[in-house]
Every structure is written in C-alpha cells, then in structure tokens.
Image (spheres, rainbow, N blue to C red):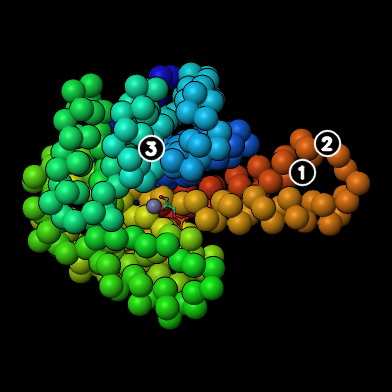
Amino acid sequence: MPLVTSKEILIDAQKNRYAIGAFNANNMEIVQAIIETAEEEKAPVIVQASQGAIAYAGLDMIVGMVKVLAKRSFIPIVLHLDHGTDYYQNIKCLRAGFTSLMFDGSGLPFTENVSLTKKVVEMAHAVNIPVEAEIGQIGKMDSSDEPGVAREKIKEFMADPEEAGKFVELTAVDSLAAAVGTIHGCQEAIAKLDIPRIEKIRDLTGVPLVLHGASGANDEEVKKGIAAGICKVNIDTRIRMAFTKAIQDYFKQNPDEIDPRKSLGAAKKAAKEVIRDRIRVLGCNNRV
Ligand code: G3H
Ligand code: ZN
C-alpha cells in the first residue's frame, strides 16, 4: 500500500494505549529488517531517517527503498524525518515524499523554536503531512559518560510541562518529543522516566508523545511511559549495537569470507530480533 502519515497511526495508538515503533534506518539491510519484521508481527511501523542517514545514503535512495517495500506490503508504513534541525531539510523531505516530519529546534531559545516549528507546520499541513517537534533537550551520551553523568545531563534539560502546553498551542504541532528522562545513545538501560511529568505534558498538550533515546530504557520503564501517554518510541542505538556485533562475530568465525551478503545477512537477522522484541514490548504487534 502507499505510505501513510504518522498522524493516523499515532492517533490509534493514543486511543488504544500502545506505542508505535520508530526505527532508524541507515542502509538497505536495516530498512528491510524494519519492514520485514513489522510485517511478520502485523505491526504498523515508522521508518525514520536522520539528517546523517540522509547524507550517508542519499534522500532519493531512502525514499526509493521505503516506497518500493511499502508498495509490496500490507502494513501501514510511515517514512519520517528524525531530528530535522534544518528548516530546509524539512522542505526537501516533504518534497521527496516523506509522510512525517520532525523539526528539532530544541537547541534554540523557546521563541525561536516556536517560530521555526510553526513555519514547518504551516508548510507541511498545507499538504496534510504531520510534524513532530522537540521541547526540553534530549541530549546525547558521550562514550566516556558514566551512568551518573548521563543522569545529571538528563535532569538538566527536562521539558517543562507548562512550556510544552504553550508550545503545542502556539505551533499546532501534531506530536511532541519531550525530554522526560532519556538520553540518546545509551548502550545500557539506565533511564528512569519521569512519569508524573509525562502525564502533565499529556494533559496539557493532548498530542501523542514521543520517547526519544529509548534504547536506554528497560521494558518496565517503556511500558510505564506508554501508560502515561507515550505513543511513539524511537530506537536506534540497540539496532546499531546488534548489527555491528553480528558483523564482528561473523568475521571472528569466518575471517576469510569475502561475500558481503553473508556478514550483512547476519547483521540484518540480528537487527530483526531487536526490532521484533521492541515491537512486542510496545504492544503494536497484531494491530493490522
Ligand atoms: O531519534 C532517534 C532516537 O531517539 C533513538 O535513540 O539511539 O538512544 O535509541 P537511541
Ligand atoms: Zn531522538
């Protein structure tokens, strides 16, 4: 079927209290892993590309791969721009056929974040494409950070619920990535979600909430977050770790193999297991 927008699947998730998995893709094997697994699990799914992924793979390549697989598929598939910090990147993705955008102005002062988000929303809504935006700052973990340091970074930049309410009212954004206890790039599940904060943001905004940096949250935290209003859960680091480890293991066992399909095939299989596990935890399986 053709790509769908994130609006339709996130509203169903919000109504029925589950979350959609939004998985980052950087190459063909990961795009295939996401879509094949979502099909096997009968789950609506969001394939998302960051600005880095677009620079690496090419915008037309990403759109082409996802559209070809969506056309063959029976599940609803969204192609989403993840952390589009550049206004023009949002325009390019809209034109290229993305069915969901994210403007990330979290590094800007509140008023600038509002005005640029609003510009993206006005443009995207003109063609019925929904927009996610970020409030507070969901930082990134440095490889040298100890869990204690990461937790301090998380605390410093949590989203203010009143500000989140005002932000949604001023921008008419469709979903909100609020900093509520996670950080990007965590290779261990150290996050503690601020559940009362999520509930307040849910009540003051009314829009589906997005959990970024979700690789660092264990199953229990993720489930508590969903019960409190999280409707989209972003996963990247867990896939990267599984993908890379599978390649490393493959070459430990087969140091002389030169067929890339063998090592990348093993990596794809490992990515699929991570995706399957997350889909089941989010409760978006058997929804199609
Ligand atoms: O936007 C992408 C996500 O927030 C992924 O976070 O790499 O910690 O899983 P993660
Ligand atoms: Zn993120």
Element marked by disc 3: strand
Q: Residue at x 46, y 66 (%)?
A: 141
Disc 2: which residue: 259
- Label 2: state its secondary structure: loop
Q: Which residue in the protein does label 1 denote?
A: 263
**Quadrant position of residue 75:** top left
Q: Position of residue 116 (x, y in %)?
A: 19, 41
Left or right: 256 in relation to 175:
right
**Residue 37 coordinates in the image, percent (x, y):** 55, 39
Which residue sits at x=55%, y=37%?
56
Which residue: 17% across, 64% down? 160
Query: Do residues under tags 2 and 1 come within 8 Å of each other at their CB atoms?
Result: yes
Mark 3 C-beta to ligand 1 under 8 Å: no
Q: What's the amino acid at mark 1?
A: Ser
Q: Which of the 4 image quadrants contains residue 179?
A: bottom left
Sequence-first tag of 3 and 1: 3
In this view, the residue farthest toward the right is 256
Instruction: Give the SS element for disc 1.
Output: helix
Label 3 belongs to which residue? Answer: 81
| Relative height, residue 99 to residue 109 (above, below) | above
* Amino acid marked by disc 2: Asp
Is residue 234 depicted above or below 198 in this figure? above
Quadrant of the rendering where the C terminus is positioned:
top left
